[in-house]
Every structure is written in structure tokens, then in C-alpha cells.
Amino acid sequence: MNKNKILVIDDEKSMLEFLSAMLTKDGFSVAVSDTGQEGVNMFKKTHFDLVITDIKMPEISGIDVLKSIRSYDTNAVVLMITAYASVDTAIEAMKLGAFDYITKPFEIENIRVIIRKALQQRELLDENINLKEQLKSEYDFKNIIGNSTPIKDVFDKVRKISRTDATVLLYGETGTGKELFARAIHHNSPRKSEPFISIDCGALTETLLESELFGHVKGAFTGAIEHKKGLFEAADGGTIFLDEVGVASPQIQTKLLRVLQEHEIKQVGGNKSIKVDVRIIAATNTDLEQQIKDGKFREDLFYRLSVIPIVLPPLRERIDDIPLLVSHFLKKYTRKAGSKIKKMSPEVMQILMKYNWPGNIRELENVVERAVVLEEGDTIAIENLPDKLREQEIEIDEKRFIAEGLKNTVEQTERNIILKAFEECAENQYQTAKKLKVSRQNLQYKLKKYRIIE
Ligand SMILES: Nc1ncnc2c1ncn2[C@@H]1O[C@H](COP(=O)(O)OP(=O)(O)OP(=O)(O)O)[C@@H](O)[C@H]1O
Ligand SMILES: [Mg+2]
């Protein structure tokens, strides 16, 4: 374990010696300073988990030390020491962000308890900071997994366009990562500290979607009892992600075209034009060009949106990525469950590589999460896969055995079924026979025939 580092600042030498000896004995790494100025300098040079400072010191007081340290690092944990007479100053210190104060003379046990609490606070703060860092990097390209040629082409393109303001149209089946890429583009763009707002054009009725996107004035329609800003205004300076743009109604399409051309919107029921500076990323899993032919999508809007079209390949066209994705999700979900890292059995991996993944990466992620939860051991077995994937296993087996003739096929399949049931029943013959709905004698005969038992 790392030793916690504590800095003690006090002009009284005997106090420094006393605290230093006590803290060292308690297993901390201790540094001391007998002036406020030197203490602050030391703090700026080295990381300390906790600072303990006397309040009353000549020249630079403990309050000034507290101020300098906290303005240098707003998360610094500082503990004040004060003589009984100056509790008022101690309270002032608390207001300035000191963790707590101790009055002299103090009991050793007391100060130990306070130090422990202060260090716990420090740990919590550190955890919080880590969490924030994690959130920040969640949309980092590093967290988008893929090494296959089709996805690498996507990465190249996306990296380049992130830095620009270009409108992007993402094509891809469900679960291929459209939203993930949209967020990554935003978080790697100069707009990253401005809002990213995602809206599913298919999830709302036309009227609602229109007022969500553009806002409305009071009394624009029944129920519009108050003036409301729309998402385009809320996303000003940032990025808006229009999911399922293919299902937007003609009226919405017209309004979107206006945003793209004029960079302005009109609220529903209003007549004032409002300028907005919003980058648009749109996504669809329908064929917009076909929709144009069918007269369902405006061609001019299509060209405005697809300045940069990006096609996200379905998972079945990039099966090389499956092992990488599996190990990424295994890590993610074992960490979440707090369990030991698990691996896939080779048979499971084989099934995962052969399945056609209509729900793409989302489906794979769900399968891995489920298996991690169900599997108690450290190797994920076929039993932990959903039926859909296990049925596929039997189909594969059938294909393999048909080549070997009917008799062999039937026998092999029968052997597999019996073996599986036998294992599932912990090799209890009575239970297995019951499960397979055969007599005990019959089961025993077959167990021997297939050399499952001696
Ligand atoms: N390359 C990848 N690496 C890691 N995780 C991924 C990758 N692609 C997608 N995912 C994960 O798969 C899930 C589905 O992705 P996302 O929601 O972006 O898909 P989508 O294309 O928007 O799907 P839908 O059309 O159904 O809305 C998310 O949990 C996402 O984090
Ligand atoms: Mg989506």
C-alpha cells in the first residue's frame, strides 16, 4: 500500500517534532516546515494527501497558508491547529474550506480520529476525480473498439472530420455504434465543452418533435402554456445528434433544411428568426436514397446532411473484431460486477464468431453481460449463452455430421444430448433419466455405449 503523505506546518519546533514522531509511528510519510511560506512552497512541489497547519504563526499565518494551498489545489485537505483562545479564527478557516480544526492541547486519540477522517475525505475526492476522468475519456476514440479494415477506415475518416464543423451523416444498422461515434466526434471537436444533445426523430409525434427541436411561443398550440426554448437553442455552440433522421416528416425536413442553410430557426407559433450555431450529426438505418426515390425524403436536405457520409459496417462484416470486443466487454462487466476476470471457453468463442449478430455490437455486449452475471466460475460456458445462440450450435453440429452419414449424425447428436444432461444433473443417473424421459436402464445402456461411463 502507498503511504499517505502528510505535511505539518508549525513555527513551534516541539510541536513539529511531536507530530512528526507520532505520524511516522502511525505509518505515514511525513514532511515538516516551520514557516508558512516554506510550507506552501513544499506543497506546490510535492503531492500531499493532507496538510496540518498551525493557525498562529509569525509572518504568514495558517489562514494564509490555507488560502494559498486551496487556491493552488481546490481539493487539498487541510487541518488547522489552534490555541483554545482563537476558535473564532478556526471557524473562519472552516468557512475557507479547512477540513476541520484541533484545539491545543489535544488528545492523541482525538487527533488520530480526525486525521483518519481527513484522509478518507481525500480518498473520496480522488475517486470522484477518477470518475470524472473516466467520463471524459468514455467518448475517447480509444474506447471504440475495432481493428478490422472496415472499422479502421471509419476511424480515419472520423478523426479527420472531428476537428471540423462539417455535417455528418452516419449510416448503420441498429447497434453498430452510431450514437457512440456521434458522441466521440463531438468530444474530439473544438465544441467539446459545449452541449451535445441527442434526439430520436422517430420517438415523438410530429408536433412534439417540432416543438422539442425548435421550441414554441406561449399559446402556439393547445397545451403550450408557456414559452419554451427548443433543443437547437439549448445546443447553441455545441452539437445536435438527429437520430433516425429518415423518419422526420416533410415539415420537419423543411425546417431542418433551413437550419442547415441559414443557421437560424423559428419557434413554433413565433415569427422571429433566431440565429443558432449548432453542428449537426444525423444518423439513419434506412436507405435515404431509396426514400428520395419514393418521394419521402427531400433530396436537397439529403445533400446538405451527407456532406460527409460514414457507413458503420455491421458486425458480421467485421468478425475479426469479435474477440477484441468480447474481451473489452468481459473487462467492463466483470469490473462492474466486482468479480474476477473471466474468459470465454473456446466453444463459446466459436459460436460467437459464427453467429450473424442482427443486433450488432449492442447484442454482443448484452450477450457478454448476461454471461458474466450467470457464470459463477472463471470460464464462460455454452450454458450461459442465450437460447438463440445455443440453437445455432446444434445447427452447426448438424451440418458437420450430415457429411458423416445419418447413423453417425444421430449417434453423435444423441451422445451430445446425453452428455450435456448428465453433466447438468451432476452425473446423477436417476435425475438424468428423468430429465431425458427415458428409463434408468436405457440411460445406463447408452452411457456405456457412448463411453460416458465405464
Ligand atoms: N466499436 C465499439 N466498441 C465498443 N463498444 C461499442 C462499439 N460500437 C458500439 N458499441 C456499444 O454498443 C452499444 C450500441 O451502440 P450505439 O447505441 O451507438 O448504436 P446505434 O447504432 O446508435 O444503435 P441504434 O440504431 O439501435 O440506436 C453501445 O452500448 C455502445 O457503447
Ligand atoms: Mg442509436
Image (tube, rainbow, N blue to C red):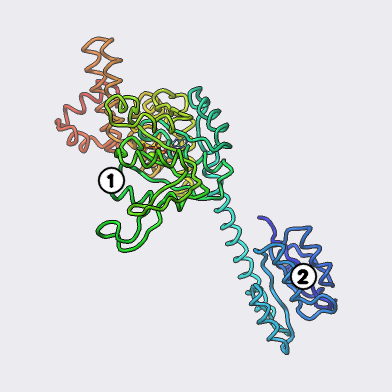
Q: Nearer the viewer, residue 322 or 71?
A: 71
Image quadrant in which you'd find residue 431: top left
Quarter of the image that includes the N terminus: bottom right
From this viewpoint, is residue 454 visible? no
Q: Amino acid at mark 2?
A: Val
Q: Secondary structure at mark 1?
A: helix
From this viewpoint, is residue 417 visible? yes
Residue under pointer 1: 206
Residue drawn at 48 percent across, 23 percent down: 150
Image quadrant in which you'd find residue 224: bottom left
**For residue 180, above or below residue 417:** below
Disc 2 CB within 8 Å of nearest ligand 1 atom: no
Q: Which image quadrant shows ligand 1?
A: top left
Q: Nearer the viewer, residue 22 or 31?
A: 31
The percent position of residue 330, horizontal first and vertical second, equals 46, 39
Residue drawn at 42 percent across, 26 percent down: 313
Q: CA distance from mark 2 to mark 1?
A: 65 Å
User: Which one is in front in this view, the residue at disc 2 or the one at disc 1?
Assistant: 1
Quarter of the image that includes the C terminus: top left
The percent position of residue 211, horizontal first and vertical second, equals 34, 51
Residue under pointer 2: 8
